[in-house]
Image: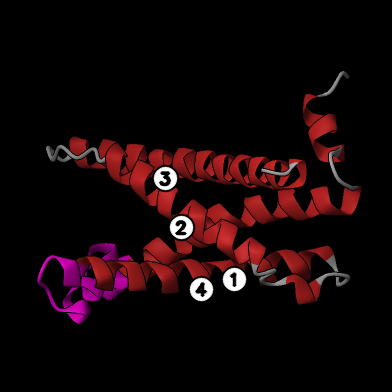
């Protein structure tokens, strides 16, 4: 394997790992809150494994979106426009690919694809909309930080956060 290929693979793995970690922490926090509210009503629920698996899958979808340069046509526009644009595009990407994933999993388990998709996000429109809004809110700071980092230059944001003071 060439040095350039190794470096690219290492970069992709680091990006995937950082996106996964960010998503897992966010999803776990939402589940922790949901669990606390439900336990107050006498209902036990904790599905951190679901958060882990969903973060793994959605991180891969995000890496694919970045590789496809999704949303980069807004580069050069005001930062807020770029952030909102990419956040919204990636939300659509993640929801769309998640629907395809759910349909394929449903088909693999002998269910109709439509039934599997309808069960996403709790199975009702209000819960699906709330889930999409939460995901959009989770993606918003991710793209703010990412795009500010791009504006500052490669490695500068990391140096600012983790380098010597």
Q: Please identify, in this view, whether the residue under mark 2 or under mark 4 is nearer the observer.
A: 4
Q: Which mark is residue 134?
A: 2
Q: Which residue is mark 4?
A: 92
Q: Which residue is mark 1?
A: 88
Q: Mark 1 to mark 3: distance in Å?
A: 18 Å
For the point 68% across and 56% down, which residue is it?
143
Badge 2 or badge 3: first in the primary sequence: 3
For the point 31% across and 71% down, which residue is it?
126
Q: Which residues are magenta?
A: 106-127
Q: Mark 4 to mark 3: distance in Å?
A: 18 Å
Badge 1 or badge 2: first in the primary sequence: 1
For the point 9% across and 71% down, which residue is it?
110
Badge 4 or badge 3: first in the primary sequence: 3
User: On screen, 96 above or below 8?
Assistant: below
User: On screen, 22 above or below 150?
Assistant: above
Q: Dot 1 lies on which element?
A: helix
Q: Dot 2 lies on which element?
A: helix
Q: Mark 1 to mark 2: distance in Å?
A: 12 Å
Q: In the rendering, at what x and y percent does residue 89 appear?
A: 60, 72
Decide whether the magenta segment is chiefly helix, strand or loop. Answer: helix
Q: Please identify, in this view, whether the residue under mark 2 or under mark 3 is nearer the observer.
A: 3
């Amino acid at each position: 394997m060439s040095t350039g290929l190794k470096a690219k693979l290492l970069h992709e793995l680091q990006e995937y790992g950082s996106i996964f970690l960010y998503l897992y922490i966010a999803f776990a926090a939402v589940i922790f809150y949901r669990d606390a509210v439900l336990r107050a009503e006498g209902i036990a629920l904790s599905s951190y494994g679901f958060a882990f698996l969903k973060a793994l899958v959605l991180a891969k979808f995000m890496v694919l979106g970045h590789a496809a340069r999704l949303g980069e046509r807004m580069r050069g526009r005001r930062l807020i426009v770029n952030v909102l644009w990419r956040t919204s595009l990636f939300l659509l990407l993640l929801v769309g690919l998640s629907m395809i994933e759910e349909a394929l999993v449903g088909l693999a388990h002998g269910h109709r694809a439509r039934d599997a998709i309808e069960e996403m996000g709790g199975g009702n429109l209000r819960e699906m909309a709330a889930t999409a809004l939460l995901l959009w809110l989770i993606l918003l700071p991710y793209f703010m930080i990412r795009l500010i980092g791009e504006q500052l230059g490669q490695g500068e944001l990391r140096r600012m956060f983790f380098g010597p003071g």
